[in-house]
Image (tube, grey):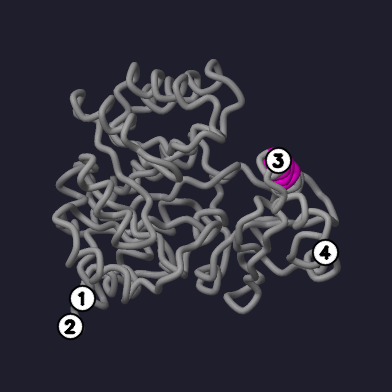
Amino acid sequence: MTTQQNIDTELTRMLGIQYPIIMAPMFLVSNEDMIIAAYKAGITGCIPALNYRDDESFRKALDRIVQAGTLVYGINLIANKSNIRLDEQLKTCIEYKVPFIITSLGSPEKIIQSCKPLGIRVFCDVVDDVYAAKVESLGADAVIAVNSGAGGHAGPMPAEQLIPLLKNKCKIPVISAGGIGNGIHLHQILSWGACGASVGSMFIASNEAPVSNDYKQAIVNYGAKDIVLTTRLSGTPCTIINTPYVQQTGTQQSRFERFLNKNKRLKKWAKMLTFYKGMKMLEKSAFGASYKTMWCAGPSIEYVKNIRPVADIVSTIIDEYHAASAKH
């Protein structure tokens, strides 16, 4: 743990961490090394359960995290029908008494009902006040307000609009996701009413991230103006870096793919195929040298200037936060 002055918010009190930051769950990117380093740096981290191909590898990862003395960490579960392994993943999370779970897509009702009696916190991704009110009524402990500055599947509203809207609508804490590139941004979202931030893209350029150096260097070299939306990865708009390959192939699905997605009988299978192909493309780009580069990231890469350890990234954010606080 670092020795900088703690930041006291609902999130730090709820999880028992020093600073109100969750290292966001990033598909393919998040791993045990990052989660362990996050906790040692005074924050917490979350891993998508889907980053593990089977229950055995998922359990090995959880064992490693726990054995490293990581008292606070989270697992991200996809709650909709596309995740055929949800029941198995949830059972393992319950068995390990994972400290908190972040739910994405679909209804979190089953997850909340299973976890709440055991003291496992459940935070739910939301993009508007209607869904936020729904998950609150189901018993969520907090909402993750996914704004338009988020990487991956972003929401439609900017943080300065979404946070006050949710604070007005909900009694449970609001954690802001998207657009955090430095400590000044952290200070801003806390002043708007959030109790913490979910931060992802900055940590792709960390020593502990398992992705290729090409991907990490892209996070450093490209900026906010280079982030574009594509429907070619999952069928729904997703933020990626506008590499020469992306410029060459375009960001929209082909006419045939769009036709399949509108066909009532074929739509389900077409979406599954699009998602599978998209994830395979992301995987090849993330871990190997390939000219077919599809690198997922958000506009906050604008503020990433070098590749460094997780602890250094956190320390800089906290220093910048305290400097911003001193001015207000």
Q: Is residue 79 left or right of residue 51?
A: left
Instruction: Work out how far the residue at label 4 is from the one at label 3, CA to CA, in angstroms.
Output: 33 Å
Task: Give the residue number, with chain letter if any, for mark 2.
Answer: 328
- Tell me, for residue 243, which label it has, or none: none
How busy is the neighbourhood of tag 3: few (under 14 within 10 Å), some, or many (20 plus)? Answer: few
Vertical placement of residue 164 versus 275, above or below: below
Vertical placement of residue 317 versus 44, above or below: below
Residue positioned most to the bottom: 327
Say which element carries label 3: loop
Q: Which residues are magenta?
A: 269-278
Is residue 48 a member of the stretch shown in magenta? no
Residue 277 place in picture, x, y as percent:
75, 43
Of 67 and 261, the residue lying toward us: 261
Q: Nearer the viewer, mark 4 or mark 2?
A: 4
Say which element carries label 4: helix
Say which element carries label 1: helix
Q: Quadrant of residue 225?
A: bottom right
Instruction: Work out how far the residue at label 2 is from the one at label 1, CA to CA, in angstroms.
Output: 5 Å
Vertical placement of residue 318 versus 25, above or below: below
Instruction: Work out how far the residue at label 3 is from the one at label 1, CA to CA, in angstroms.
Output: 56 Å
Q: Nearer the viewer, mark 4 or mark 3?
A: 3
Residue positioned most to the front: 264
Task: Give the residue number, with chain letter if any, for mark 1.
Answer: 325
Task: Give the residue number, with chain letter if any, for mark 4.
Answer: 245
Mark 2 and mark 1 in contact? Answer it, CB < 8 Å: yes
Magenta region, mostly helix, strand or loop?
helix
